[in-house]
């Protein structure tokens, strides 16, 4: 029996090594425009489970919440530059997919970003998994009616800007480009990212409201309202505030944590709420909000809100050690060791934890792995389903990542919190 157990362990290790050296490249690319925000990103920021705007509510009612948790994944894996051939008219914003079909709805009340026609704008594109390629940005023609389905012929014939391999930093691509001149009112900026190392392509609809470009805007927005804190836990909280006003329009809000000589930027959002994560249990915090318009003018700070996080969960009879092994560009392999610290055996177990930096599970071994949004679960398989007192088992996985790869801060085993070692 000892020899058989050793052979099984060796086979498991070899399978893990084989999976590590064969990551699937097509699973590693994810990303979407965050400024100006896409439809899915706007609705995700509103809260997938309870969106604020009528358009986002209707989209969730039609397509469910998963497209918003996967707001960065609107892609066609075999596009290879054939965008107009494979995406039908009326389905551009959902890229012809069933999953994102709700975001093709033709209506004029999608959340939008106010931009000044002809001005310089700093575009931001989230890089959940970086890859080389070319971004092309198109804008709808003058006279476009957002209440009609978006067709390829509604777009200007050529992109108003394109860029190959833009600068990458802080988990996002960024570039500055001049917005089209002569645009007023509601339009759509349609962005295509075609990877150069794969036929995979990504598609984004960003709803915008153009104002006339004369003169230059030098008027700052008013200060946002005092934030209120809700859903405060040991490691997170939700902040909400009254909107700022601006002569042209507010394009974003920045949330800062008071930190002495240099306050820390913790979130940038386009809506009037932000969900904060990664806080420390039983710690006092103060946060304030600053509004930003499309011309780069910033408001005075809002009054601060103070909160104290709750205590951490009481741990049960288990301990977890999470370890990152090999890490490569866009991915990594990791292991989790689970130990029964109690006095009775654990028969059948499910481990759960959250990833907070957009990591996406690719494959795993020594457990049945699954992921929904940030939540990752691993359920025992036959050979490690029973953990005797003092016993442990190690399970492993491959995952994709962007530029940040922080470890989970909390783990549960059969819904009981474990000590993290």
Image: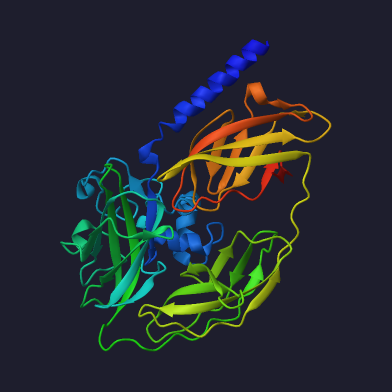
**Residue at left offset 26%, top offset 83%:** 213
Residue 13 found in image quarter: top right
Q: Nearer the viewer, residue 43 or 302?
A: 302
Give the farthest residue toward the left.
157
Quarter in which the N terminus is drawn: top right
Quick check: 372 above or below 270? above
**Residue at left offset 25%, top offset 46%:** 196
Residue 220 found in image quarter: bottom left
**Residue at left offset 46%, top offset 84%:** 245
Q: Nearer the viewer, residue 107 or 252?
A: 252
> Image check: 142 left or right of 54?
left
Q: Is residue 149 visible?
A: no
Q: Residue 352: x and y, percent? A: 64, 42
Q: Residue 64: x and y, percent? A: 49, 51
Q: Residue 209: x and y, percent? A: 33, 74
**Residue at left offset 58%, top offset 78%:** 261
> Image check: 215 left or right of 289?
left
Q: Is residue 367 visible?
A: yes
Q: Nearer the viewer, residue 142 or 293?
A: 293
Quarter in which the C terminus is drawn: top right
Residue 411 found in image quarter: top right
Quick check: 272 above or below 126? below
> Image check: 320 left or right of 370?
right
Q: Which of 145 and 5 is in front in this view?
A: 5
Quick check: 143 above or below 83? below
Give the farthest residue toward the right.
343
């Amino acid at each position: 029996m000892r020899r058989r157990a050793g052979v099984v362990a060796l086979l498991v290790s070899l399978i893990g090594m084989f999976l590590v050296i064969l990551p699937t490249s097509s699973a590693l690319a994810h990303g979407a425009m965050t400024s100006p925000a896409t439809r899915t990103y706007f609705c995700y920021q509103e809260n997938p489970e309870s969106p604020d705007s009528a358009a986002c509510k209707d989209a969730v009612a039609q397509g469910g919440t998963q497209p918003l948790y996967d707001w960065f994944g609107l892609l066609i894996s075999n596009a290879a530059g054939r965008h107009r051939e494979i995406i039908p008219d009326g389905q551009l914003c959902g890229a012809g997919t069933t999953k994102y079909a709700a975001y093709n709805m033709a209506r004029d009340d999608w959340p939008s970003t106010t931009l000044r026609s002809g001005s310089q704008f700093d575009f931001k594109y989230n890089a959940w998994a970086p890859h080389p390629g070319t971004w092309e940005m198109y804008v709808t023609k003058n006279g476009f009616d957002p209440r009609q389905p978006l067709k390829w012929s509604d777009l200007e014939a050529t992109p108003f800007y394109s860029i190959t391999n833009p600068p990458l930093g802080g988990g996002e691509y960024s570039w500055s480009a001049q917005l089209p001149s002569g645009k007023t009112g509601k339009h759509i900026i349609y962005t295509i990212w075609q990877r150069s190392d794969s036929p995979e392509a990504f598609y984004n609809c960003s709803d915008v409201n153009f104002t006339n470009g004369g003169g230059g805007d030098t008027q700052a927005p008013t200060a946002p309202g005092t934030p209120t804190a809700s859903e405060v836990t040991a490691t997170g909280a939700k902040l909400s505030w009254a909107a700022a006003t601006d002569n042209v329009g507010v394009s974003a809000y920045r949330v800062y944590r008071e930190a002495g000589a240099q306050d820390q930027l913790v979130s940038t959002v386009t809506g009037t709420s932000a969900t904060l994560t990664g806080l420390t249990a039983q710690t006092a915090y103060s946060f304030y909000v600053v509004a930003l318009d499309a011309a780069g003018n910033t408001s005075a700070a809002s009054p601060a809100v103070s909160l104290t996080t709750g205590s951490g969960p009481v741990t049960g009879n288990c301990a977890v050690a999470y370890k990152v092994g090999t890490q490569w560009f866009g991915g990594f392999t990791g292991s989790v060791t689970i130990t029964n610290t109690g006095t009775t055996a654990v028969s059948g177990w499910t481990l759960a934890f959250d990833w907070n930096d957009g990591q996406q599970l690719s494959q795993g071994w020594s457990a049945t792995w699954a992921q929904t949004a940030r939540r990752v679960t691993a359920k025992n398989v036959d050979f490690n389903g029973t953990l005797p007192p003092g016993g442990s088992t190690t399970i492993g996985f491959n995952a994709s990542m962007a530029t940040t790869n922080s470890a989970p801060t909390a783990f549960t085993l059969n819904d009981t919190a474990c000590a993290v070692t």
